[in-house]
Image (spheres, rainbow, N blue to C red):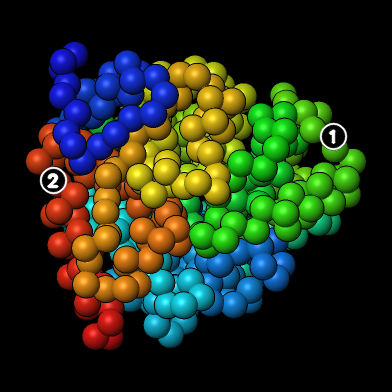
Amino acid sequence: MKDLELPPSLGICGNTDVALNILSRIWGKRGVFTCTVGNTMTSTIPGISDAGDTPDLTLFTPAADAEMLVLGRTVCMKGIPINPGGIPTPATLTMAALQLTDMPLYIVDGGTKIKPNLPCFDVGGTYGESILTGKAVKNVRESYERGKILGEMLSKTYDFIVVSESCAGGTTTALAVMMAMGVLKENLVSSSSPNNPRELKTKVVSDSLAAAGIKIGDLANDPLKAIECVGDPMMPANIGMIVGAAKRVPVIVGGGTQMAAVIAAAVALDDSVVGNIFQGTTRWLVNDPKSDIRKIMESVHKDVPIVYVNMDYSESPYEGLQAYEWGYIKEGVGCGGSCVAAIAQSSGNITCAELLDKVHDIYKGLLDL
């Protein structure tokens, strides 16, 4: 399938040849979706994260997202995980993609304070402390190695794998890790709010690197150490899964600027993954004027492209969904990666219109609950 014609539902940034090569190898094939949940106390710093109605509720968001994906409802909290203002979790879009394809789904517990009420793969992680301590994550090496085993296991059963996350506060930890590695020297990461708190994130990261005794670029060759100091527990599990799975099958890394740090670390640890991975995300994230995923990924590696889904909520009858067009949410819970995977698995037959119709069904059902 060298002459794969990209459907209008998808777009590509970066190395188009690599992206089309990988897409051609998973077109019409059977994938599996994974979502790694994790907590970092960084998310409770006031103003740092909108992935929850209050700073403390950000700790419930990953567990609630996992329960939504698997159970279709939340158990750990009332209602559904929302942003301030009532904007629903991007898990609603992920659910739509998974339901349209009946793609298998597994939750990985990277290290949570609030546990999802469902079976999870356990990689031996514990929830993360605030990165301001300079000692953010324990058991990093163990989580990485177990994630690698999990990636290898799944790659023996499925034709491709989606690796994604739900970890509030994760763009701040991602910025810290990418600066510790020298991938970034400035703040280019996104936010779930249209009012990206860039100055606050930059100060928190600067103070955190100082607390850990790290200068920009000091840990270019030791990403696991960077995570131990200023990362979050989602990261080592997902890095391991990418490295383990990409030896055998293509991997869609579902997420935005948060997952760019995961890709950067995976490439630093094993550059053989290049050519077998791409980032799967959304039009909202790619076009975000307050961040720059294109520039970040160019800094990570020129041959790790971005494939994005052209979802558009502007005509939705629900204001909570229309808010995505106003700069809210943009990514999370693998919503972009799952949509790219669904379109690829269906050989391009699933459209953005079908995905939107399914999102409406899911969202209406949640509102009725």
| Left or right of 73 on screen, residue 203 | right
Name the residue rendered at 19%, 14% in the picture.
2
Residue 53 appearing in the image? yes
Residue 44's image quarter? bottom right
Residue 350, numbered circle: 2
Q: Considering the numbered disc 2 on the image, is that residue within a helix, a strand or a loop? A: loop
The amino acid pointed to by label 1 is: Lys
Above or below: residue 108 compared with residue 77: above
Name the residue rendered at 31%, 56% in the picture.
94
**CA separation in Å, label 2 and label 1:** 46 Å
Which of the pair 262/108 is nearer the observer? 262
| Left or right of 273 on screen, residue 177 | right
Residue 223's image quarter? top right
Residue 243 drawn at (x, y percent) = 50, 29
Residue 215, numbered circle: 1
Which of the pair 200/223 is nearer the observer? 200
Q: Considering the numbered disc 1 on the image, is that residue within a helix, a strand or a loop? A: loop
Which of the pair 292/348 is nearer the observer? 292
| Left or right of 352 on screen, residue 133 | right
Q: Quadrant of the C terminus?
A: bottom left
Residue 108 drawn at (x, y percent) = 46, 53
Which of the pair 101/248 is nearer the observer? 101
Residue 135 drawn at (x, y percent) = 80, 51
Above or below: residue 4 compared with residue 84: above
